[in-house]
Image (tube, grey):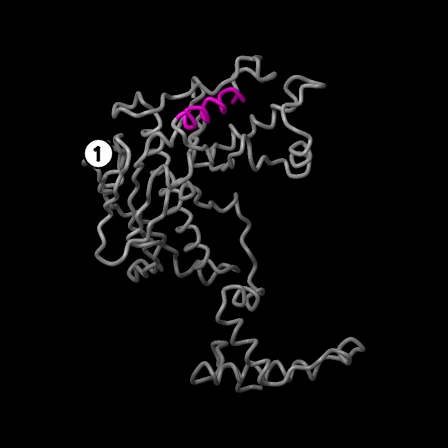
Amino acid sequence: MSTLFNTHGEINASNVQEALSQIVKYASVIEDLQPSSNAQATAPGLNDGQRDEMIKQALMTQEGKIALGQAMANPIRRNLDYQGVARKALVVDPLPQGALPVYDRDIDVAAVVVSSNGSAPESRVFGDRVTVPEFEVVSNPTVRIAEVKRRRFNVVDRAQQKARQEIQAQEDANVFSALAFAGNSDSGFGGENAQVTLQATGGGTLGPSIAGQLSKAGMLDLKRSIDRWDLVTSKYFLNINEFTDILNWESAGGTGSSMVDPVTQRELLQTGLYGHIFGADIVVSKVVPAGRAFACADPEFVGVMPVRQDIEVLPADEPKQLKLGWVVNEIIGIGIVNPRGVATGTLSGS
């Protein structure tokens, strides 16, 4: 066993097959040294070929690598890892090599696109077609080589994960910026839906509410703005602050003032989360600006996100500064082709 590892703790093997064979032999020796028990005596054994196949499959999957690397301690994280949500609002269109992001429109309204430098949205009307500009979203994380040696967790994988999350957050910020521009007829481009006032005034025909917070009437006004165009509202996008206001609806007026049905009450008590309201999904994201809410129709009635290149990780080390680095980027476009399928509202003072 003294020749299994070299002085650097690496397996002495000339190729992957030999390394797997060494691992199998090492596992067999460990198994022989362990005391036997009744459970082990009755358990079916694995031959060398089966062990070899299991290890090979484990090394080829992300889950298997995680299982084999359990000796590394996980970092204590400050908050939840961010997950991109804005693609739920648009049709994602992977572009073939050389294809142009040009889309036909069968409606007589202006379209909204994010400009080629990824800045402010703008209005464009090109007859029956709209060309969606493409732009790059980039992140450049770096890690000092000393930190790689010092940390007890895989800081390289963690840096790449955080870079992907940053890319998704930038992507979502651009999408919600375009939705806010398209869903407000006062934004200067001639939108179809007026901005809705969302806050409650402390009462009303739709049940009791808390003044200054998101109201049921405001959510229904968002839905009405889309439904009047013979479309169906399928999603609400909220910040966690406005989502929490929904949880106050149940207790706002005391005993007997329930504003949800018994089945929804049960889901609320068990999970603390509304999955649906008024037949639409509720999607919560910290990228949605506080004090604002969005309502969208089905993606095919809202807009498109052409994807020239999905998230890709390229090495970009900085040897002179003793740093490992990567360039994480994607090339996308954002176009709201039918502004009638988008409605937005704000709380006054936000």
- Relative to the observer, which residue lies in front, 303 or 150? 303
Picture layout, residue 260 above or below residue 287:
above
Q: What segment is highlighted magenta in the picture? A: 214-228
User: For residue 216: magenta?
Assistant: yes
Q: How many marks?
A: 1
Comparing 219 with 82, the one in front is 219
| Residue at 45%, 32% in the rendered image | 233
Residue 222: image quadrant is top left
Q: Residue at x 22, y 50 (%)?
A: 100
Q: Main secondary structure of the magenta part?
A: helix
Q: Which residue is mark 1?
A: 124
**Please, what secondary structure does the residue beneath circle 1 have?**
strand
State the image quarter where residue 133 is shown.
top left
Q: Tell me which corner region of the image, top left, top right, bottom left or bottom right, holds residue 191.
A: top left
> In the image, residue 324 lies at what x, y percent?
36, 60
Identified at 42% across, 48% down, the residue is 165
Mark 1: which amino acid?
Answer: Arg
Query: Is 251 in front, or is 67?
Result: 251
- In x, y percent, where is residue 152? 53, 60
